[in-house]
Image (cartoon, rainbow, N blue to C red):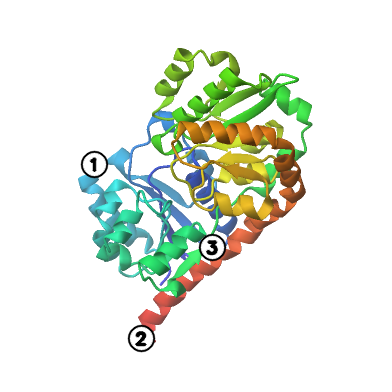
Amino acid sequence: MRGAQNSKPVVFVFPTFLAVGGVERNTAEVIARLKADYDFVIVTFERLAAAHGSLHHQFHTCAKAVYDLTEIGRHDEIVPYLRRLEALYRPELVWICNGSPWLAANTANIRRIFASAAIVDQQVYDTDQGWVSLYRQRDPGLLSFDRFIAINSRIRSLFIDQLGMDAGRIDLIYSVISTEKRAQALAIEPETLRAKFGLEPGKRYLASIGRLTAQKAPLDFVGMIEHVVRNGPSDVDFLVVGSGELDGSVDEALANRGLNGRVRRIDYVQNSFELSRVIDAIVFTSHYEGLPIALLEALSLGTPGLCTDTGDIGLVFREYGSGLTFEKIGDPVSLARGITSFLADYPVYKAAAVEHADTVARRFSMDAIQNQYRACFDAALDSLNHTATGQ
C-alpha cells in the first residue's frame, strides 16, 4: 500500500535530532540522492540544543516533511503523535538512522505502531558503547525489526558471530562523502582557501573536526597539542573545528595550559572539504567511531589522518597506508608517542594519501553508496510484500 496519493514508497526517517554531525550529514546526502525513488518524512524525538547547530535547512530541501515531535509536545505524547503520522502517511518503510533515548525505551511501541511497515535499523556506531547494549540484551522489539545496517565490518561481525543474527538481514554500508562538495573545494586555489581560514604561511596545521562531545574526547586532543607545544616541532599549529557541550571545557583547558597562541577555534565550516584540502592532517582522538565522514573527506583530498583505532579506521589505514592509529584510546603517553611518530614519518603518510585520494573518493561516493541503500530498502520492502501475500 502506498501512502495517501503517493506513487513512491513513503519512508519515515528517525534521527535523534537534526544537529550538525556526521550521521545527520550522511542521512541528508542519502535522502537527497534517493528522493526520486522514495518520499522521505523526517521525525525527530529530542530537542536540538543551540550548541549542536542545525541541519534543518538541508533536510527541508530533500524531504517531504520534517516533524520535531518534542518541539511541539512532551515525550509522553510521542506515541499518539506517531499514530497520527502513521495514519496520515501510511509509510511502507521506517529507517531508524540514529535512535534517541526515548526510542531505546520504546522499540516495542515502534514495532506495534508501524506493524504494516518494514523497519530498517541503523543505530549501532560502536561495538562496546551506546545502542549495541540493546542488541546484547536481545531487546525483543529491536530484534523484531526487518533489516539491520552495520556501518563497519566490526559491527557486522558482532551481529553475526556474537549475537547470532541472520547475515542475510544485515547490510554493511559505509558512510558517504559528497562528490559535489569535493569538486567545489578542488576548484578553489589552495592559497585562497588558506586565506579564507586564516592559515599562516610556513605553518603546518593539524585539525580535529567534529562535535565537542565526550565521545570525541576533545580534551585528549588538547593534551596532545600541549605535548607538541612543549616538545616541538614549532611550525605545527592546530585547529579545533566544531561545537558542543564541551565548548567551555575545551576553551578553559586551552587557556589554562597556555595553548591559545597555537590553536584556532572554528565553530562550523559550511564545506569541510575546503578546510581538509589545506590542512596537513586530520586528527581523531575519539573513544569510538564507525568510520568518520570527516576522515574520508580528508583522505579523498590526499590529506592523511592520525586517529584512535576504532571502527574501521585502522582497516582503511592499512589498506591505503594513509594514516596512523594511536596504540591506546584515552592514554596520554600513547597520544604523545603517536603524534611524534606521525610527524616523523609524515612524508610517507602524505604520499600514500595523495596516491589513493581518487580511489577513496570513488569508493565512498554517493554514486557507489546510494545503490547499497537502495538495495537495502528494496530488500526490506520486498520482505514486507512477501509477508503480506503469505509467501
Decide which of tag 2 and tag 3 comes sooner along the chain. 3
Please tell me which residue is depicted at 63% across the width and 55% down the height of the picture.
366
Tell me residue 181's x, y (percent).
Answer: 67, 42
- Amino acid residing under circle 3: Tyr
Is the residue 381 above or below the residue 78 in the image? below
Q: Quadrant of the N terminus?
A: bottom left
The answer to whether residue 92 of the structure is visible from this angle is no
Q: Is residue 88 left or right of residue 21?
A: left
Q: Is residue 321 left or right of residue 36?
A: right
Decide which of tag 1 and tag 2 comes sooner along the chain. 1
Tell me residue 193's x, y (percent).
Answer: 72, 28
Residue denoted by label 3? 373
Is the residue 256 above or below the residue 169 in the image? above
Alpha carbons under labels 1 and 3: distance apart: 32 Å
- Amino acid residing under circle 1: Arg
Residue denoted by label 2? 390
Q: Nearer the viewer, residue 170 or 76?
A: 170
The secondary element bearing badge 1 is classed as: loop
The answer to whether residue 289 of the structure is visible from this angle is yes
Tell me residue 312's x, y (percent).
Answer: 54, 53
Alpha carbons under labels 2 and 3: distance apart: 26 Å
Q: Is residue 53 left or right of residue 194?
A: left
Q: Is residue 329 left or right of residue 87?
A: right
Residue denoted by label 1? 74
Q: Dot 3, crowdedness within 10 Å: few (<14), some or many (≥20)?
A: many
Please tell me which residue is depicted at 68% across the width and 49% down the height of the picture.
321
Residue lying at the far left in this picture: please name it: 76
Q: Dot 2, crowdedness within 10 Å: few (<14), some or many (≥20)?
A: few
The nearer-to-camera label among 1 and 3 is 3
Alpha carbons under labels 1 and 2: distance apart: 39 Å
